[in-house]
Structure formats: C-alpha cells, structure tokens
Amino acid sequence: MLTPDQRQAWQHDGCLVLPGFKPAAETDAACRRAREIVAAFDPGATSSRFSTRDRSKLADAALLDSAEAVHCFFEEEALDGEGRLCVPKDRSINKIGHALHDRDAVFDAFSHGAELAALASALGLVRPQVWQSQVIFKQPHIGGEVGWHQDASFFVTTPQTVLTFWFALEDATLDNGCLWVQPGGHRGPGSVLREQYVCERPAGAPPRLVMKPLHATPWPTAAQARALPVAAGTLVVFPGLLPHYSPPNRSAKSRLAYTLHVTDGTAAYAPENWLQRSAALPVRGLA
Ligand code: FE2
C-alpha cells in the first residue's frame, strides 16, 4: 500500500506523512468526543498535572491508573501555585490518556480498522499491539512545549519495535505547535535510545516512575530539525527511536492530535515499562 516515494521517506527519514488518512467526519467526531470527556471530567477529583519539564510529576498514581482507563491530565500553566485551576476547565487539559482505544467507543472505532492494520503490516509490524492512546490538546496560549525525546523510551521492546501513529485532529501549524522531527535520526551511529522511562516497584513502597539516562548522545540541534505542519486528517507515523519535539502553542488556536503507540507482539515487552496491562484488559491489535 506504500508508494516507492513513501517507502523511501520511511527508510531514509524515519517518517511517513499521509495527508487525508482520516476523513473530516472522523476527526470531527474525535474532537467532539474529546471535548465531551473533558466536559464530564471533575477537576476536583484529581490534581495530576502533566509536565515533561519535570517528569517527577508523572510519578503519580493517576498515571499508572490511566493504563487501563481514561484520565484527563492538566496543562502545567492551567494551575496556580496552590494547584487551583486558573483557566476555564475546557482550556485546562494537556491530554487525555491512555486507554481511550479500548474504553471509549468513538476512539475504539478511530483506532482500529483494516486500513490501519494494513499500514502497520506494510511498516513491518507482524503482530501489532496497541498499548496507549492519547488526545493531546496543545491548548491555545498555554499549550506547553514537549522537548526532544524518543517514544521508545516509554515502550521498550527487544528488539525495538514501537511505532507512533500521530493523527492531526486539527490543523497543526508552525504557530500552534506542530511536530518537529530529526529526519534520519532513527538510523546510523547516533540512533541510540538516550533514556528509558521505567517503573520501579520497591517492596513495601508505592511504585516510582523514573527517567533513566542510557546514553549520552546529544539531542539534535535546531539546524537538524524539520517542522511537520500538517492538515487535519493527516497521519504521521514514525519509529520509536526518531527524536522529535513540539514547541509551545502561544497562538489563539488549539492543536488537537491523537496518538497510538504500537509494538510488535513478537518482540519481548519490557516488564519495567510504566504501562502494563492486567488480564482484565489485555492488549489488542489494530484490526
Ligand atoms: Fe513523542
């Protein structure tokens, strides 16, 4: 199903951009549903704030719970020093995660189907396993930066297999914080996994989430980064080793995106990965 140019882009750049992969009816339904979930969310019930600048804030029972549930996570700048909301609730959410694809009918339909399964197969996944789904809001004015990282840090398998499926639910532009990638950063001598996000489970203490440095290879320079402004409905796929980031959104427009992280079930999934599934909600494929 891939054209020779697409296959070349995948191998050379480590990035596949498929405009129009999702019709407007599906992206609109996903945006609508995401906003319904936020409307139904009680901000008093949790204070879990998502920040990639201070990852210790992720070390939070709400994050671990979200492996099999649908949780809303606040934008860092949405809360004041006392943890009180200082923007309207519908502008306060950084993301929703992480089992939307299994727990929510609209996102279940969005995340599964013959076309996605065929694409995963064309990209080499023998037995796809969808571990995580997220709606990322990039709220107007306060949508925070997500610094350079590799998604494989969160989904280690042996061998490395995780792919990110990143769907633009709204137009992603240079102004509202589109993705930036390092083309080719997934291959060659610099393509090591730099850090790994692990869940330590000390006896008699609550689990602890830690980002462990693995390799001192520097992150790409600004000159090595390529922006990926894309229209709503575009699917961007990249392998777990590809460094990428997104700048803050200081514009007046939101930038909703939906991501799936998919590994190959023929590879061993690391027991120290933060996201584990119980027998009550086994991991599923894309079909
Ligand atoms: Fe990422």
Image (spheres, rainbow, N blue to C red):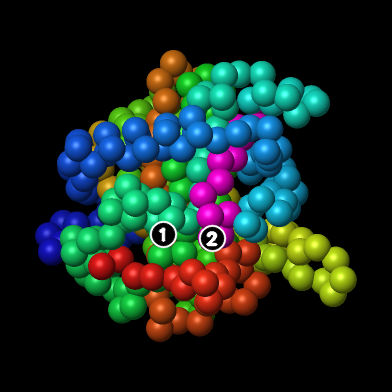
Confirm or reject: label 1 Cβ below 8 Å from ligand 1.
Answer: no
Q: Is residue 196 above or below residue 225?
A: below
Q: Which residue is mark 2?
A: 68
Foreground of the two, 87 or 14: 87
Residue 259, percent from left and from top: 40, 50
Q: Is residue 227 left or right of residue 273?
A: left
Residue at x 75% of width, y 68% of height: 200
Q: Nearer the viewer, residue 188 or 25?
A: 25
Q: Disc 2 on helix, strand or loop? A: helix
Please identify the quadrant where the N terminus is shown: bottom left
As drawn, is 26 to the left or to the right of 13? left
Q: Is residue 172 left or right of residue 214?
A: left
Mark 2 crowdedness (10 Å alpha carbons): few <14, some 14-19, many ≥20: many
Above or below for 269 versus 252: below
Identify the amino acid type marked 1: Asp
Q: Are marks 2 and 1 in contact (CB under 8 Å)?
A: yes
Give the image location of residue 275, x and y in percent. 58, 64
Percent position (x, y) of residue 186?
A: 43, 62
Q: Quadrant of the C terminus?
A: bottom left
Residue 56 in the image, given as x and y percentages of width and height: 75, 49
Classify mark 1: residues with Cα within 10 Å, few (<14), some (14-19) or many (20+): many
Nearer-the-camera pick, 168 or 203: 203
Q: CA distance from mark 2 to mark 1?
A: 8 Å
Residue span colored magenta: 66-77
Identify which residue is drawn at 40% across, 83% down. Answer: 266
For the question of whether residue 156 can be seen, the reply is no
**Of pointers 2 and 1, the one earlier in the residue sequence:** 2
* Residue 73 located within the stretch drawn in magenta: yes
The residue that mark 1 highlights is 102
Please tell me whether residue 45 is drawn above or below residue 58 in the rendered image: above
